[in-house]
Amino acid sequence: MVNLLILLSLTFLSYAYNQTLFIFNQTLDHFHVPYQDAGTFPQRYWIVDNYFNPSYGLVFLYLCGEYECPGVDPTRLFPLQVAKDNKARFVVLEHRYYGESLPYNYSGMLPQLLTYLNAEQALADIAQFIRFLNGEMALTNPGVSFKWVVVGGSYAGGLSGWVKTRYPDLVAVSWASSAVVRPILNFTDFDKQVYLSALKSGQSCVNAIRAVNSLVETQYLANNLGPVTDIFNATAAFQGTPDKRPVLFYITDIMAELIQYGHRTELCDALIAVDNAWDMLKEVAILGDEYGMADPTGYAVNSLGSFVWTPSTAGRQWWWQQCTQFGWMQTPSEYQMRSKYLNLTFWDWYCNAIYNYPGGLPLPDVDIAGYDLNYLGTNILYTNGDEDPWQWAGINVTSTDARPVLLIKCENCGHCVELYTPAPTDPIELTRARINIRSLISKLLRNN
Ligand SMILES: *[C@@H]1O[C@H](CO)[C@@H](O)[C@H](O)[C@H]1NC(C)=O
Ligand SMILES: *[C@@H]1O[C@H](CO)[C@@H](O)[C@H](O)[C@H]1NC(C)=O
Ligand SMILES: *[C@@H]1O[C@H](CO)[C@@H](O)[C@H](O)[C@H]1NC(C)=O
Ligand SMILES: *[C@@H]1O[C@H](CO)[C@@H](O)[C@H](O)[C@H]1NC(C)=O
Ligand SMILES: *[C@@H]1O[C@H](CO)[C@@H](O)[C@H](O)[C@H]1NC(C)=O
Ligand SMILES: *[C@@H]1O[C@H](CO)[C@@H](O)[C@H](O)[C@H]1NC(C)=O
Ligand SMILES: *[C@@H]1O[C@H](CO)[C@@H](O)[C@H](O)[C@H]1NC(C)=O
C-alpha cells in the first residue's frame, strides 16, 4: 500500500505551469482616518491557471513572506501540486515592503516610513486582495462563489493562520506550515531545539557547535575577530561598528540555519570530522556559503541600518518586524548553543543600533501584539518539522484542542519541510505526511 502511494506521489512530479505577473493597487494604511489617507502602493501577484477548472470554485493563495517573492517558488512546488489535484487557480502574493511591493522608492526606508510595516496591515492587504479577486472572478464566472485556501510557511504561515482567524468569511481553509504564531521576546526554546536537533547526531556534534561558539567568543573578548571574519570574507561587512557582538550572532546563526533547513547531518558530520575549532569554523563557512546562509550583510548593523536597498534586501524590514512586534530574540538557553552575550541586553542594543529610532526603540511588548493561541480560529492545518527550532513559536501536537496539528518526524526534517518539491530521496515519513496533508485539506474544505 505504502509503495503504491509513493509511486502515486512521484508520478505527480512532472508538470509544467505558466505564471503571469500582475500589480494590485493596494491601500497603504488600512486603518487611516479619511483626512490622513496615505495613498496606495503597487503589490505584486502572480496567477497560474494551468490546472484551474472554475466550476470547482477553488483558489489557492500562496503567501510570500519576508523576502523578495519569486512568484511560484520552483523549490517549493508541493502547494502547487495540491492546488493542481483540486483543480484550483493558484495565486502568489508578495508581502508589503518586500521585493518590489514597496510603498516608497528604494531610498525611502527611514524608520518613520516603516510605520505601515506590521502584521495587521499585511493581513488587511490579504483580505482586500481576496475581495478584489473575488470581484474580478465573479465577472467571468457568474454564479460560482469561490473558496480560498491560504498557504504560507514560517512568518507567512503565521499570516495564513491569522488571516483565516481575522477574516473567516473570506478564507475557507488555512495551511499554516511551520507557522510562527506566538510572539516571544526571550526565545530560549530556539536555542534548546538547536541542541535537541544536534543531539540526534550525538553529543560530539553538540560539543563541536559549542567549541565553535567558544572560539568566536574568545576572539571577541580578545578584540581579535579579524581571523574569524576573514574565513567568512566578512571582515569588511562588520567594520562599521566598534561593537562586534553581531559576529557572535552571525556565526552561530549559520549553524542554527543549517539545522533549521534540514542540513543537520551534513553540518554535524563536517564538524565531527575535523578536530580543532578553527577547522570547524572553516567547515561552517563552506556549508554556509554552499546554502547561501553566510551573507554578513543580513547581520551587520551598518548594512541593516542603511536606507538604500535592492529588491532582494529584506533584513532591514524583517528586523523591524521583530524589533517592534514579534520579538523572537534568540537568546542562550541552559543548553548553551550560543554565546551568553546574545541575551536580551544584546538584542535591545541591536534593534537600537540598526534603526537609531528617534527617542529610542524599546523591545516589543509581545503580550499586547494580540496574536496568541486564543486568537486562532478553526479550519487551520498546522504543520511543523521535528528538527526545526522555530516550532516552539508555533502550535504543537500537545495542544489540547481539536486543531489538526502535524509534527513531521524524520531525519533532517526542518522548517516548512513539506512545502518543498517532493523528491525521490525524501524520507518515507515526509511522503506520508504529504499524503496526509492532501486529504486533511480536502476534509477541511468539506467542513466549510
Ligand atoms: C506556457 O506558455 C507558453 C507560451 O505561451 C506555451 O507555449 C506553453 O505551452 C505554456 N505551458 C503550459 C504548461 O501551459
Ligand atoms: C490607485 O488607487 C488610488 C486611489 O485609491 C488612485 O488614486 C490611483 O489612480 C490608483 N492607481 C492605479 C494605477 O490604478
Ligand atoms: C524617495 O522617497 C522619499 C520618501 O518618500 C522622498 O523623500 C524622496 O524624495 C524620494 N526620492 C526619489 C528619488 O524619488
Ligand atoms: C530568558 O529565559 C531564560 C530561560 O527561561 C531565563 O533564564 C532568563 O532569565 C530570561 N531572561 C530574561 C531577561 O527574562
Ligand atoms: C568578499 O566580500 C566583498 C564585500 O565585502 C565582496 O565584494 C567580494 O566579492 C567577496 N569575495 C568573495 C570571494 O566572496
Ligand atoms: C547580558 O549579558 C551581559 C554580559 O554578560 C550582562 O552584563 C547583562 O547583565 C546580561 N543581561 C541580561 C538581561 O541578563
Ligand atoms: C506546546 O504549546 C503550548 C502552548 O503554546 C506550550 O505551553 C507548551 O510548552 C508546548 N509544549 C511542547 C511539548 O511543545
Image: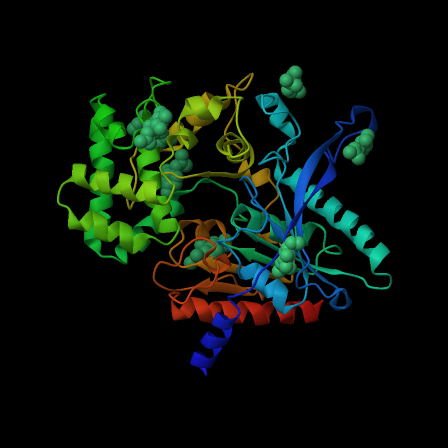
Relative to 422, 140 lies left or right: right
The residue positioned farthest toward the bottom in the image shown: 1
**In the rendered image of this protein, does residue 175 appear above or below residue 92?**
below
Number of marks in the rendered image? 0
Residue ID at (35%, 50%): 259
| Nearest to the observer: residue 212 or residue 69 | 69
Q: In which quarter of the image is residue 54?
A: bottom right
Q: In which quarter of the image is residue 51?
A: bottom right
What is the x, y in percent for residue 171? 71, 56
Residue 332, can we see it? no
Residue 387, can we see it? yes
**In the rendered image of this protein, does residue 200 appear above or below residue 220?**
below
What is the x, y in percent for residue 431? 45, 69
Relative to 97, 416 lies left or right: left
**Ligand 5 occupies quarter:** top left
Relative to 11, 368 lies left or right: right
What is the x, y in percent for residue 414? 41, 55
**In the rendered image of this protein, does residue 417 appear above or below residue 283?**
below
Residue ID at (72%, 66%): 448
Residue ID at (58%, 36%): 98
Residue ID at (37%, 65%): 425
Relative to 3, 100 lies left or right: right
What is the x, y in percent for residue 213? 25, 37
| Nearest to the observer: residue 258 or residue 211 | 258
